Amino acid sequence: MGDLLERLRARGWRMTSQRRVVAEVLTGEHVHLTADEVHARAAERLPEIARATVYNTLGELVALGEVVELSTDGRAKRYDPNAHRSHQHLVCTGCGAIRDVRPTGDPLAALPDAERYGFAVSKADVTYRGLCPDCATA
């Protein structure tokens, strides 16, 4: 059983077969699927699942804070179930692949006081961009 399913059960989230299959599809490390990819994978397990059900379920998971919605470089939104572990993203500028990374150091500490302009900064979202090994050799 994946971390996302366990978190949803602990919250008492009503686990219909459709919701369960969406959560199962999202379970795992480095999962950053689009809604259409979630639907395609969910339909392999539960052929009758409607696209609208997948979109609605993803919206609920985002609203609950159990899944993070990512948008990179104008590409389709992707859904990250790694919502409760501090991490950043490494994005391929060629194919759009996304990997979770956990660099050392505090990105908030990297912002000098003079560059905060009086903001009480509480969070930093860092995205690293480059070419994945497949795109770099193409």
Image: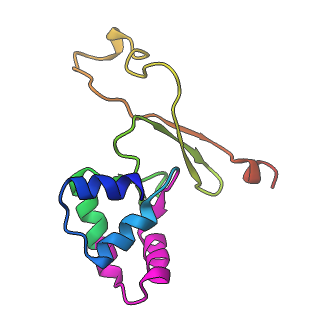
For image coordinates 47% across by 37% down, the residue present is 88
Against 55, residue 137 (above or below) is: above
* Magenta highlight: main SS: helix
Against 46, residue 57 (above or below) is: above
Q: Position of residue 1 (x, y in %)?
A: 42, 59
| Quarter-of-image position of residue 19 | bottom left
| Name of the residue lying farthest toward the front | 1
Q: Position of residue 85 (x, y in %)?
A: 39, 38
Against 51, residue 88 (above or below) is: above
Q: Nearer the viewer, residue 56 or 125?
A: 56
For image coordinates 76% across by 48% down, the residue present is 136
| Name of the residue lying farthest toward the bottom | 48
For image coordinates 25% across by 75% down, the residue present is 16
Q: Magenta span has 90?
A: no
Q: Would you say 122 lies left or right of 33 here?
A: left
Q: Give the number of callouts.
A: 0
Residue 128 appears in the rendering:
yes
| Quarter-of-image position of residue 90 | top right
Q: Would you say 104 lies left or right of 123 here?
A: right
Against 17, residue 10 (above or below) is: above
For image coordinates 65% across by 54% down, the residue present is 94
Q: Nearer the viewer, residue 118 or 7?
A: 7
Q: Magenta span has 48?
A: yes
Magenta residues? 30-55
